[in-house]
């Protein structure tokens, strides 16, 4: 067991965690932030994507102890962020949600992209979404949603 201190969705947290505890489990089970989904457990689907220190990462591949001192943002925090709110509304308006299982991860990848590149090219959008698998949308509504946010910014 190790005590870690980190910031999750703007709140400082200090918790004792087992050395083998994955970040996805820490978020979902310990902090009850269940918006982060677990799909494949091997970093292939992107359902568990969160933003860590400004970068979109798969939380199933990171141990909680590796997050000491980190700043983590989960999908639950998007309703407090102007760009996050615009993303969510655009995804609903343009059909980027469909079944919804991949949506939290796709939103977090999109948020990290727009934070790093406020006016990304089509290529940058596609590259940012590479780690997120969606079997429902064909990605066109997702890309349309992101582009709608760019027009609104």
Image (tube, rainbow, N blue to C red):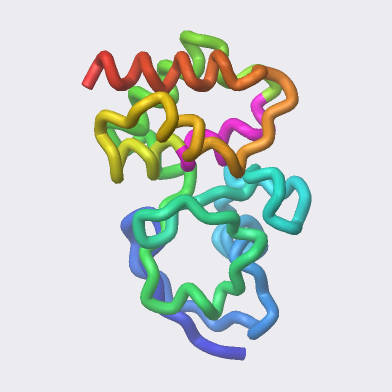
Name the residue rendered at 74%, 58% in the picture: 42
Where residue 49 appears, x then y in whole percent? Answer: 56, 48
Horizontal side of 45 relative to 144 (left or right) equals: right
Magenta region: 100-109
Q: Is residue 140 above or below residue 57?
A: above
Residue at the far right in the pictured view: 40
Residue at the far front in the pictured view: 123
Question: In which quarter of the view is residue 136 placed?
Answer: top right
Q: Is residue 66 above or below residue 122?
A: below
5 part of magenta stretch: no
Q: Is residue 64 above or below residue 99?
A: below
Name the residue rendered at 48%, 41% in the picture: 109
Where residue 92 appears, x then y in whole percent? Answer: 50, 15
Quarter holding the C terminus? top left
Residue at the far bottom in the pictured view: 1
What secondary structure prevails in the magenta region? Answer: helix
Name the residue rendered at 64%, 85% in the picture: 19
Where residue 112 appears, x then y in whole percent? Answer: 39, 44
Quarter holding the N terminus? bottom right
Of residues 100 and 33, the one drawn nearer to the viewer in this rendering? 100
């Amino acid at each position: 067991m190790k005590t870690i201190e980190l910031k999750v969705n703007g709140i400082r947290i200090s918790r004792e965690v087992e050395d083998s505890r994955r970040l996805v489990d820490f978020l979902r089970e310990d902090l009850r932030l269940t918006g982060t989904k677990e799909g494949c457990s091997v970093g292939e689907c992107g359902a568990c994507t969160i933003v860590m220190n400004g970068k979109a990462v798969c939380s199933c591949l990171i141990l909680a102890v590796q997050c000491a001192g980190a700043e983590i943002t989960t999908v639950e925090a998007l309703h407090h962020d102007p760009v996050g709110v615009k993303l969510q509304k655009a995804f609903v308006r343009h059909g980027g949600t469909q079944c919804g299982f991949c949506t939290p991860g796709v939103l977090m990848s999109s948020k990290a992209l727009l934070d790093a590149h406020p006016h990304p090219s089509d290529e940058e959008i596609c590259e940012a979404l590479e780690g997120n698998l969606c079997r429902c949308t064909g990605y066109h509504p997702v890309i349309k949603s992101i582009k709608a946010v760019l027009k609104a910014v």
